[in-house]
Image: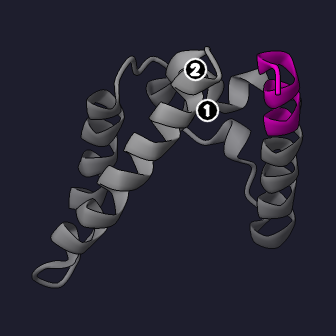
């Protein structure tokens, strides 16, 4: 499968997921304040730094931060690798490339 076809398929899946999220939650991720910060990230570590700041802002029971971090690290790394495979780096896994 070509990169163009892969990207087109990814665009369609991602756009559908954004729409479904908005329908269920009534929240538009394209207007979320973290979007602009995450879009400037150039590595999984940069994304994780921003997300860790958000985790620490929650009043979590002891160990809550660790459980969230243990889930986030592999998720961010997989999304970054997937994005890089399609040739666009972390910028591809962002809302700015998709019509909302």
Residue underneath mark 2: 91
Residue farthest toward the left in the current orientation of the protein: 62
Q: Quadrant of residue 4?
A: top right
Residue 76 position, x and y percent, is 41, 45
Residue underneath mark 1: 93
Position above or below: 92 against 35? above
Q: Left or right: where does residue 20 sit relative to residue 81?
A: right
Query: Residue drawn 26% across and 32% down?
Result: 45
Q: Secondary structure at mark 2?
A: helix
Label pair 2/1, CB-CB below 8 angstroms: yes
Along the line of sight, the residue nearer the viewer: 17 or 77: 77
Q: CA distance from mark 2 to mark 1?
A: 5 Å
Residue 68 position, x and y percent, is 30, 67
Query: Residue drawn 70% across and 32% down?
Result: 95
Where, quadrant-wise, is the N terminus in this rendering?
A: top right
User: The magenta stretch spans which residues?
Assistant: 1-11
């Amino acid at each position: 499968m070509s990169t163009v076809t892969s990207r087109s398929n990814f665009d369609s899946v991602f756009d559908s997921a954004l729409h479904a999220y908005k329908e269920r939650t009534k929240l538009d991720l394209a207007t979320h304040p973290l979007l602009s910060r995450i879009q400037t990230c150039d590595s999984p570590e940069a994304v994780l730094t921003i997300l860790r700041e958000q985790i620490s802002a929650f009043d979590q029971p002891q160990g809550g931060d660790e459980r969230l971090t243990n889930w986030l690290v592999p998720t961010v790394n997989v999304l970054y690798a997937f994005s890089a495979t399609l040739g666009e780096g972390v910028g591809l896994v962002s809302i700015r490339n998709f019509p909302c």
